[in-house]
Image: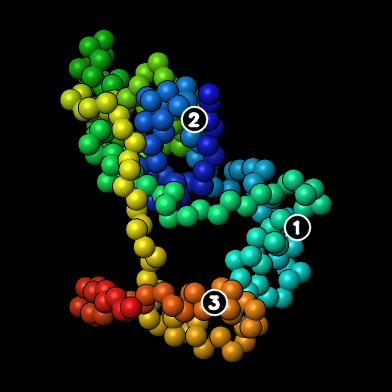
């Protein structure tokens, strides 16, 4: 019923509009009753996942080469003496939905804090507009009792917080996105593909046949007009 997320405080990676609208939607459609998202300050956190990464890194230092995705999976699974410590779930492009293009039809991107609109505030307090700036906050909370509203605080366990109504008033009932982000494999830079093929002679034949020949068959693209400040992509099959 509750979901607690701890994320790196990295703009665009985890700290973005699409992620927050997704958790708001999950609460509104009753998949969850409460979601809390924590963005610990850099250098002030040491979570269990950090210890897990240390175990994997220790195992990685003992290995000379990894040739395939299966090699990486095997290394992770064997990084702990506890066979149930790690599990690996392979994500396919059919599982990745486009929340970035989806959320504007249901949610506003920017709004002012409800506290700034309160009639109980003095005129001076109401003039102090608090905008929804994701980058300044380190804690977010959504609850089913306040659908469409997200609580934000600059500090985890902070005394002061603001509430923002992001749900559009005239929006239809929430429907999760059905459009996929990727409908085909992403092309690889032509220069990178060239470098990879030059390394093919060092790859064992079983790994070459089971993994790398597929990589070499993917589409490629080239980037031009960098000097003029423009980037053009040309895709080859």
Q: CA distance from mark 1 to mark 3?
A: 24 Å
| Residue lying farthest to the right in this orientation | 81
Q: CA distance from mark 3 to mark 2?
A: 41 Å
Q: Name the residue beneath numbered marker 2.
A: 36
Relative to 221, say whether 147 is above or below: above
- Judge by depth and name the residue closer to the eye, 154 or 140: 140
Q: Is residue 83 left or right of residue 165?
A: right
Nearer the viewer's eye, disc 2 or disc 1?
1
> Which mark is first along the chain, 1 or 2?
2
Tell me, yes or no, whether the two marked residues, 2 and 1, touch with CB atoms within 8 Å: no
> Tag 1's secondary structure?
loop
- Judge by depth and name the residue closer to the eye, 105 or 51: 105
Q: CA distance from mark 2 to mark 1?
A: 32 Å
Q: Name the residue beneath numbered marker 3.
A: 212
Relative to 151, say whether 53 is above or below: below
Relative to 97, say whether 106 is above or below: above
Nearer the viewer's eye, disc 3 or disc 2?
3
Nearer the viewer's eye, disc 1 or disc 3?
3
């Amino acid at each position: 019923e509750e979901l607690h997320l701890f994320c790196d405080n990295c703009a665009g990676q985890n700290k973005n509009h699409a992620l927050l609208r997704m958790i708001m939607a999950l609460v509104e459609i009753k998949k969850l009753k409460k979601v809390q998202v924590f963005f610990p300050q850099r250098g002030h956190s040491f979570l269990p996942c950090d210890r897990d990464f240390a175990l994997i890194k220790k195992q990685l230092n003992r290995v000379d080469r990894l040739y395939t995705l299966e090699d990486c999976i095997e290394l992770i699974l064997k990084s702990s003496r506890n066979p149930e410590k790690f599990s690996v779930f392979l994500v396919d492009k059919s599982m990745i939905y486009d929340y970035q293009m989806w959320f504007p039809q249901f949610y506003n991107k920017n709004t002012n804090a409800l506290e700034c609109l309160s009639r109980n505030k003095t005129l001076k307090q109401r003039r102090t507009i608090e905008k929804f700036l994701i980058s300044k906050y380190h804690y977010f909370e959504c609850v089913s009792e306040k659908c469409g509203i997200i609580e934000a605080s600059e500090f985890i366990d902070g005394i002061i917080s603001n509430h923002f109504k992001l749900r559009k008033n005239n929006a239809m009932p929430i429907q999760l996105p059905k459009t996929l982000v990727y409908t085909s494999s992403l092309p690889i830079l032509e220069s990178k593909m060239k470098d990879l093929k030059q390394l093919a002679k060092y790859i064992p034949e079983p790994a070459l046949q089971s993994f790398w020949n597929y990589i070499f068959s993917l589409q490629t693209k080239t980037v031009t007009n960098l000097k003029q400040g423009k980037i053009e992509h040309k895709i080859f099959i």
